[in-house]
Image (spheres, rainbow, N blue to C red):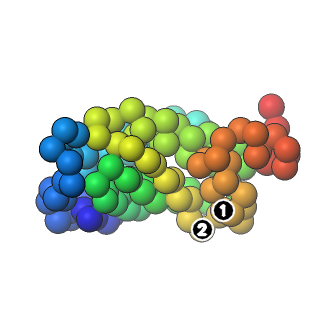
Amino acid sequence: MTHDGPAGSGSGASPSGGAEEAPVDLERVRRVAGSVKDPEVRTSIAELGLLDEVEVDGGRVTVRFHLTSPLCPAKFAGAIGQQIRRRVAKLPGVEAVEVVLTDHFMAEALHRLINEGDRFAETRGVMRR
């Protein structure tokens, strides 16, 4: 498993189980996830210091982030998380992505929204359009 915390101190390339698929590039995942902009301040979450951790285990990627306030509106929190997930999922070698929002009053519901899709959010009223 390759692990990268807030200071960008990854442990290097992770051993790959299959020769057909290129290993996931941890730094590229970090750059792509961190480039997502906070819609309120129009600045990337990396520049704001909100990208906490990126983990790569084969083709599985976990991205952890937080927001400037634990009371950030759910529509912004969900949109940021979904954008991270969509962008990271497009990278070579990525088979699965989990995005984890920490320190938010609706973290559990937003986790389901981000990782399971809009159907959950619409039925639960998490995101109003």
**Residue depicted at x 76% and y 39%:** 119
**Residue depicted at x 20% and y 48%:** 18
Q: Where is residue 125 drawn, in percent x and y?
A: 85, 46
Please indicate, yes or no, whether residue 17 appears anywhere in the rendered image.
Answer: yes
Q: Determine which of the numbered discs, if any, sits on residue 103 in the image.
A: 2
Q: Amino acid at mark 2?
A: Asp
Q: Nearer the viewer, mark 2 or mark 1?
A: 1
| Mark 2 touches mark 1? (CB < 8 Å) | yes
Q: Amino acid at mark 1?
A: Ala
Q: Is residue 128 above or below residue 102?
A: above
Q: Left or right of 111: which side holds 127?
A: right
Q: Residues within 10 Å of mark 2 (few under 14, many from 20)?
A: some
Task: Give SS at disc 1.
Answer: helix
Q: Is residue 27 above or below residue 21?
A: below
Q: Residues within 10 Å of mark 1 (few under 14, many from 20)?
A: some
Work out whether residue 125 or residue 120 is closer to the camera in this orientation and state it: 120
Work out whether residue 36 or residue 48 is closer to the camera in this orientation and state it: 36
Q: Quadrant of residue 3?
A: bottom left
Q: Where is residue 64 drawn, in percent x and y?
A: 46, 59
Q: Left or right of 4: which side holds 95?
A: right
Q: Quadrant of the N terminus?
A: bottom left
Q: Determine which of the numbered discs, if any, sits on residue 107 in the image.
A: 1
Q: Where is residue 120 drawn, in percent x and y?
A: 76, 46
Q: Where is residue 19 drawn, in percent x and y?
A: 15, 44
Q: Determine which of the numbered discs, if any, sits on residue 16 in the image.
A: none
Task: Give SS at disc 2.
Answer: loop
Q: Left or right of 113: which side holds 122?
A: right
**Residue depicted at x 19% and y 54%:** 16
